[in-house]
Amino acid sequence: MIKAVVFDCDGVLVDSERINNEVFARLATRAGVPTTFEQSVARHMGRSTVECVAELAAELGRPLDFDLPTEYEHEVLARQHEGLVAVDGVRDLLDLLRAAGVPVCVASSGTPREIAFRLGRTGLDGYFGEHCYSASMVSRGKPEPDLFLLAAAGIGVDPAACVLIEDSPYGVRGGRAAGMTVVGYAALASPEVLRGAGADHVVAAMAQVPPLLGLG
Ligand SMILES: [Mg+2]
């Protein structure tokens, strides 16, 4: 029996991943690691910026010569001020869960500031209250299970009774490692990639989620 639903933020609640990956690809290239949008989606989407930067530094064999995480956050927030929207159908899903009394929370690789901005900007903040968990609160981000275990503990639900909705292979792997049932939302990552990462179900639209939860 499903007792709670855990939502990734970027690409699942808010339609932010195109901007995120455009900005990250450009900054990684500027740092000396040529990166296309598609490479950013494959390698970095769903992970914390700090961990991605550590990987770039390892590849370069030296620290980056500018503060990429700070520039990334600044530029992404500036661009998302103009046109950030909720993912299609996710508000209906949240309303359905609220009506059914199913607890929800957010588990995101973004910083607390990024999460608060994106949920506030799209009017989704009211669904989650204090239950927004950031990779900055744990020592190991996705694809490790730490963030998802923290989120489950925060809402007081056994991870095995949680369904996680994720759009990146790193997030899918982290959720599975935490013992959650994982629904992959295929947008920028393909259904094959999400299944390969271990997703129990893959959907192309949020309207396909309620039946998987035994709702609607
Ligand atoms: Mg995501």
Image (spheres, grey):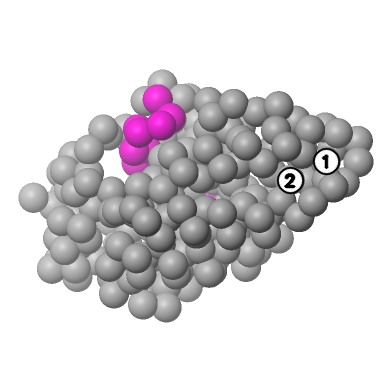
Residue 49 % position (x, y): 65, 50
Q: Residue at x 44, y 67 (%)?
A: 117
> Could one spot residue 51 in this view of the protein?
yes
Residue 24 % position (x, y): 60, 41
> Could one spot residue 160 in this view of the protein?
no
Nearer the observer, 203 or 89: 89
Residue with the most extreme top position? 192
Label 2 with label 1: CB-CB less than 8 Å? yes
Residue 17 % position (x, y): 44, 43
* Range covered by the magenta-colored residues: 176-190
Q: What element carries label 2?
A: helix
Q: Which residue is drawn at 91% across and 35% down?
A: 61
| Three-letter residue code for mark 2 | Val
| Three-letter residue code for mark 1 | Ala
149 sits to left or right of 53: left
Which residue matches tag 1?
Answer: 57
Label 1, residues with CA under 10 Å away: few <14, some 14-19, many ≥20: some
Q: How far apart are marks 2 and 1 (CA)?
A: 6 Å
